[in-house]
């Protein structure tokens, strides 16, 4: 879902679905938790506050975020450790930290308010900046501007349609490529926002800025946000101790679908197409799902934090004995 405009810049940072997440993680039991997306450290802080025996190993691929989280959580001393990594490498991160099993794992997916509000990183059209959008500039991935300079019109349209759910994706892609061919490639946030606004037209009364969906789509593509999420969930469950919890907050329908299906599979529900004569997806019961339906924020939370609007929280607990 597109993140609505407004409120983000001015609202203080507030972790999404905080109480619900801490409850599902059963953080009051203490033990070692992995926060895969530390961001500004809001969820990590609440885990550390839930029990004196709680420790957090916090992962983020954004160095700037980690630096702020380290400062914010310094008062917890050695109970908080921060690691710069992609959470999809969680197995390797824990092996290096010489950790075999953990009590809980959290992933609060997507972009942080720090990233969106940064005047220079190109995530938002509220600031004029080079069209960058990389969460981890050290990872050697292409910027959004480079992507728009390299991909074909069809590929650009596909990204904007799939990840942004933007109906006018083809028209936007055509305009981007036409500009490129005229020797005026899109290099800044304002360039892109202006082009999309003109390509999409004034339309009916909008809740969100016309460029919101296109920006969201590009960000997801630049950071390969949907890649290997299924493998991450499977790896995370492997790393839980019996009765350990995994909680995932997603903001995009494609993300939520991947999380839902992987959790179903890990709870023993076959995900094979109905025509297959026997199960090929290796579904086996390793977890109990704790959220039959995803948890969404209450109205008051959305009123105070528009970004929470599309949040969906799913959680599971590892079974005591995993049947073979
Ligand atoms: C929504 S924010 C997390 C906010 C955090 N829960 C808090 O309370 O402040 C998402 C964070 O995850 C990070 N992130 C996104 N994808 C990641 C990945 N694959 N590996 C590591 N960090 C990632 C982003 O850099 C961002 O800081
Ligand atoms: Zn199957």
Image (cartoon, rainbow, N blue to C red):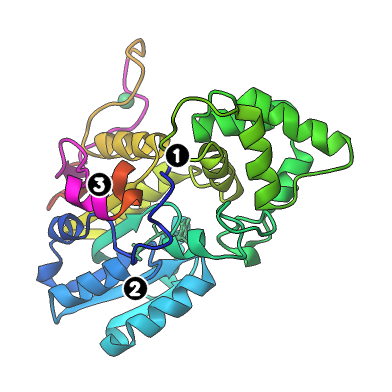
Please state the quadrant of the image where ligand 1 appears: bottom left
Whichever of labels 2 and 1 marks the residue nearer the N terminus, that label is: 2
Is 286 in the magenta?
Answer: yes
Residue 170: image x %, image y %?
Answer: 65, 23
Q: Residue at x 29, y 63 (%)?
A: 14
CA–CA distance between discs 3 and 1? 23 Å
Res 298 seen here = no
The residue wearing badge 1 is 208
Secondary structure beneath label 1: loop
Q: Are marks 2 and 3 in contact (CB under 8 Å)?
A: no
Between 93 and 220, the residue placed more toward the observer is: 220
Tell me the crowding category of disc 3: few under 14, some 14 to 19, or many 20 or more residues within 10 angstroms, Cα based.
many
Pair 2/3: label in front: 3
Q: Residue at x 71, y 45 (%)?
A: 147
The residue wearing badge 3 is 313
Q: Quadrant of the C terminus?
A: top left
Q: Quadrant of the N terminus?
A: top left
Residue 157: image x %, image y %?
Answer: 64, 28
Left or right of 160 in this view: 289: left
């Amino acid at each position: 879902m597109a993140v609505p405009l407004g409120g983000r810049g001015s609202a203080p940072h507030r972790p999404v679905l905080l109480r619900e997440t801490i409850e599902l993680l059963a953080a009051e039991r203490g033990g070692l938790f992995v926060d895969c997306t530390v961001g500004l450290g809001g969820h990590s802080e609440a885990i550390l506050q839930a029990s004196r025996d709680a420790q957090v190993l916090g992962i983020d691929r954004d160095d700037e975020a980690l630096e702020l989280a380290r400062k914010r959580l310094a008062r917890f001393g050695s109970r908080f450790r921060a690691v710069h990594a992609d959470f999809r490498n969680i197995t390797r991160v824990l092996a290096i930290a010489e950790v075999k099993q953990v009590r809980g794992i959290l992933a609060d997916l997507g972009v942080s308010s720090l990233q969106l509000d940064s005047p220079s990183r190109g995530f938002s059209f509220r600031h004029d900046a080079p069209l960058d959008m990389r969460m981890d500039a050290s990872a050697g991935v292409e910027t959004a501007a480079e992507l728009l300079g390299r991909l074909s019109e069809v590929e650009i349209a596909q990204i904007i349609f799939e990840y942004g759910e933007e109906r006018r994706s083809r028209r936007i892609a055509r305009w981007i490529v036409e500009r490129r061919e005229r020797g005026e490639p899109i290099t800044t946030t304002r360039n892109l926002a202006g082009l999309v606004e003109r390509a999409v037209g004034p339309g009916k009364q909008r809740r969100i800025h016309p460029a919101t969906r296109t920006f969201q789509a590009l960000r997801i593509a630049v950071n390969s946000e949907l890649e290997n999420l299924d493998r991450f969930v499977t790896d995370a469950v492997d790393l839980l101790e019996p009765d350990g919890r995994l909680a995932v907050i997603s903001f995009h329908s494609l993300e939520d679908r991947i999380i839902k299906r992987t959790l179903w599979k890990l709870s023993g529900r076959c995900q094979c197409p109905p025509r297959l004569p026997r199960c090929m997806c290796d579904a086996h019961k390793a977890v109990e799902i704790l959220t039959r339906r995803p948890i969404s924020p209450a109205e008051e939370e959305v009123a105070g934090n528009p970004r929470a609007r599309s949040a969906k929280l799913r959680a599971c607990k590892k079974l005591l004995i995993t049947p073979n």
